Every structure is written in structure tokens, then in C-alpha cells.
Amino acid sequence: MRSAIKRPSEAESDLSGFQLFKKLTEDEFNRLNFEKTCSIYKKGTIIYREGSRLTGFFCVTRGIIKIYKTGIDGKEQIIRFAKKGEIIAYRSLLSQELACTTAKVIDEAALCHIPYQTLLYLIQSNWQFSHHMLQIACRELREANDYITDIAQKTVRERLAEVLLLLKENFDLDNQNTLQISLTREELANMVGTATESVIRLLSEFKSDKIIELQGRKIKFLDIASLTRVANL
Amino acid sequence: MRSAIKRPSEAESDLSGFQLFKKLTEDEFNRLNFEKTCSIYKKGTIIYREGSRLTGFFCVTRGIIKIYKTGIDGKEQIIRFAKKGEIIAYRSLLSQELACTTAKVIDEAALCHIPYQTLLYLIQSNWQFSHHMLQIACRELREANDYITDIAQKTVRERLAEVLLLLKENFDLDNQNTLQISLTREELANMVGTATESVIRLLSEFKSDKIIELQGRKIKFLDIASLTRVANL
DNA sequence: TCGACAATATGCTTCATAACATCCTAATTT
DNA sequence: AAATTAGGATGTTATGAAGCATATTGTCGA
């Protein structure tokens, strides 16, 4: 299930950049470092699977993780992507439920595993940590609510445009305005909640409308303003 | 914006039944009681509005509150209903954002307002309170994720069946299996994310399939098994 | 380098559901 | 009781998007 291939670098094991841990005392931070386990996971690796019991949460120090749920007849619904500086698996851990999502590496990643006991210790010993954790959960909750409204009320076209803009916000562009995350059409469809063919068609339309440019999986933004208009934002 | 009409009863001001406050010390609980403000809100009252700044969160001790977001051209998307024992408005408060939903009374309600300062005090002074709060947020987050998957992948028919089952779970039935919450067809549509006409049609179908019985807004369950099958659960 | 498989692209058909237009019914007001 | 209004019901039509078939391109391993 997990497959570490090589040792993570110093930087990839360093959690001091995480906002979440900023308010820890030296002792608390040392204990965190002592009890964490960092590993490299190659593309395609499943970090945890829907229905499994989790032993801790993970901090992403490199790479991209796809978090998704499996719906009707195996069709996956992408909930979010996690990148450097974000945490995953904390939801199921805190609510003491089995994992309700699967996490899969889509860009070789470095993760630090923090055991449940350590999490509980931090919650007990440092209220600012709990407070920060609450803020993370509540922000994610807002995003989820926004998404529900969008998906329930917008057309596939609007949602796809919005998803592209969202990706642009979260995974910045190179100097040529090209998106630095490589997703298949199917993955885009699984974010938008539509069929792969529909995504392909709409992307072609956006392309002939000069809103984007396509080269394989690379998506280059030509006209953000139009895209925003299409997204109905 | 707020309109208290009469004084709440003893029972309606009592927060000792809330799981969330179970682990408070006597002092903490006393301070909570001292700083809370309980009122009665009549049907139709807006508790808080999308975009407003909140001064605290609310505990529901009686009645039903509809939490919804306003989407494209004013169409409302119902996020959830809150009833006795639940809390509302805590999300925006904790993440320090403006309210992203509106809360409206649909069954005369009694609410206790807990100021932000009190919330912060409890988070700082009692880690078990924070922990419990985290669990509430994380559970709601799972529900939101489940809902996203459903709405993205299921048909309107399946979603409506599922919503009916969900209502059955959350608002128990009378001795004749009739749902004890009265919603308009439009409100059902706003939960499911569809048009009012579609809900009307599908409810009629369920009725002629002997799955439910309808009398105005009263919905009586005849065949839960079939409904579950329709919902594709 | 070739074969094989996965991903992408595109046309055509089908179907679920939204949108529109009435009409009906029950509750509320005057 | 007449008048008004909100909610509910139903038929008709329009359309967005899914599903299927098929072609093309791209990618990886032997």
C-alpha cells in the first residue's frame, strides 16, 4: 500500500514552514519532529484508501496528492488536490471515522506522517494549535459548501471554466501562462462532475474561442477575463 | 434583522443537554451561561445573512433553521437544516470570514447566542471543548464531501429519494410514518439542486409507485426499502 | 522499432431534465 | 363571500449533456 523509495531530503522533512505549527513551543515542536516519519512516495502510490483506518495525518512537503471519493460504479469524484504546506487525512482522524476518501500521488511527493497520539497531544497541550486546526477545517468546509452550490446550479461549461480558474489559483503558471499541473481529461471530468467527452469538447471550444491553448495535457491561459465570464463569477 | 417576540422558557435556555458543553468545568459553564443570550425567533426570521459579520454562534434549543447559500440569480441552495442540539454560524466565526450562508427560521425556534469572545475563551481554557468542536466541523465536512459526490454523480430521481431518507433520519416520523418537517416543493428542489417542477413530478411518481403518500406538504413513508433502492444506496 | 494499450478527439443518437405555459387548489385577506 | 396570492400539478417543448461508436494520437515496454 505504501512504498517509500528513497530518503527525503532535509528540506522535505522540515515542518517549520507550516503555518499550523508556528505557535508550538520548542518542546512541542521537538516532540513533533521526533514522532513524525517522512517518506517519498512515487507517482501513482495510494497513501490511504477509502474505508481504511488511519493512524495519523500527513503534511505535504513536496508534490501533489489527489483526494477523491469513489461514487457510483467506481466513478471517482475529486474533492481536492493537496500540495506543499497542506495537510491531508486529518478529517477522518479527528472525527474518528474510517477514511471517506482515497489519496493518490499524482506528482512525486514527500509526506510526513504525524501519529494520532501526537495530534492528540498537540490538541491537549496547545490551544493555538487546536484553534488553527479549527480554522483549516472551517475554511475547507466553506469551500465544500461553495462547491455544492456551484455543482448544483451551474452548467458543465461554467463549472469547467471555474475549475480551470481554481487550478490557476492553486498551482501557479509558468512564465508562459501554462498551468503547472498535469491532469488527464478524465481527471478534469472527475473534478467538474461530468463525462470525459464533455470536457474534451468544451476544452476544444474554449480553444477555438481563443480562451486557452492546448498541447497535450498542458493548458495555457490566453484570456482570463473571458474565462471568468464563462464561469459566471 | 432579529426579532425576539417572547421570552424563552427555562428549558429553552438550558445548554446542559448539548454534548459540546459536557466537558466544561463548573466555572466555564457558569461563564457560558452568564454570557449567552437566548431568544425566540418566529418563522421566517433571518438569523444572519450571507456576507454579514457575525458576533457569535448560536445553539438551537427548539425549532428548525434552514441554512442556505444564494447562487445564480438568487436561486437558493440549501446546505443543511439545524435542529435542537445543533449549533449554527460557528464556521464563519472560527475561520474569521463573513457569513457565506443565510440562516432562516422555518419552524419557530429558540436560540442561544454565544459571543465570539466566549467561544475564544472556551477554546483557550478547555482543550476537550476544542476537540469536540473539531469533531463537529470534521463530521460536517464529511457530509459535505458525500453530498458533492452525490450531486455530481447521481440523477435527480436518486438524489430526491436520498434527500427524503436523509430527512427521515434527521427529523423523525410520527406514529404514522409521516415526516415531521414541512417543506415546500421548492425547498426540496433547493436541497436536491433541481427545478421545483421536477420535484413535483418525481414525488407524484413515488406516490403512484406506492413508495410514499402525499397530503399537501405532509410526506408519509410507505416503503423505505424501495426508496433506498431508488436512491441507489 | 514495433506492437499494444491508454488517452484524446469527434460525430451521432438518445434521454433526462429544465424551461415555459397554464390551470388548479387552498389558504389568507378584506 | 369575493378577491388575492402562494403553492402545487401537469402537458409541451427545447436542450444540455451522456452514451456509444470510431478514429486518431500518444506513450510505454518488450
Image: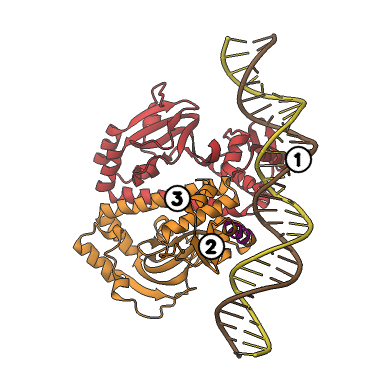
Chain colours: A red, B orange, C brown, D yellow
Nearest to viewer (mark 3 / mark 1)? 3
Three-letter amino acid code at the position of disc 1: Ser
Circles 2, 3 touching at the beta carbon (< 8 Å): no
State which chain disc 2 sits on. Answer: B
Three-letter amino acid code at the position of disc 2: Glu
Question: Which residue lies under the disc numbered 1?
Answer: A208
A164 displayed left or right of A129: right
B136 displayed left or right of A141: left
Instruction: Give SS at disc 2.
Output: strand
State which chain disc 1 sits on. Answer: A
Q: Residue at x 58, y 32 (%)?
A: A182
Residue A210: percent from left, percent from top: 74, 42
**B135, above or below B57, in the image:** above
Question: Which residue lies under the disc numbered 2?
Answer: B213
Instruction: Give SS at disc 1.
Output: helix
Specify which label sits upstream in the sequence, 2 or 3: 3
Question: Which residue lies under the disc numbered 3?
Answer: B143
In the foreground, A101 or A35: A101
Pointers 2 and 3 within a single chain: yes
In the foreground, A8 or B19: B19
The quadrant the C terminus of chain A occupies is: bottom right
Q: Residue at x 59, y 44 (%)?
A: A193
Instruction: Give SS at disc 3.
Output: helix
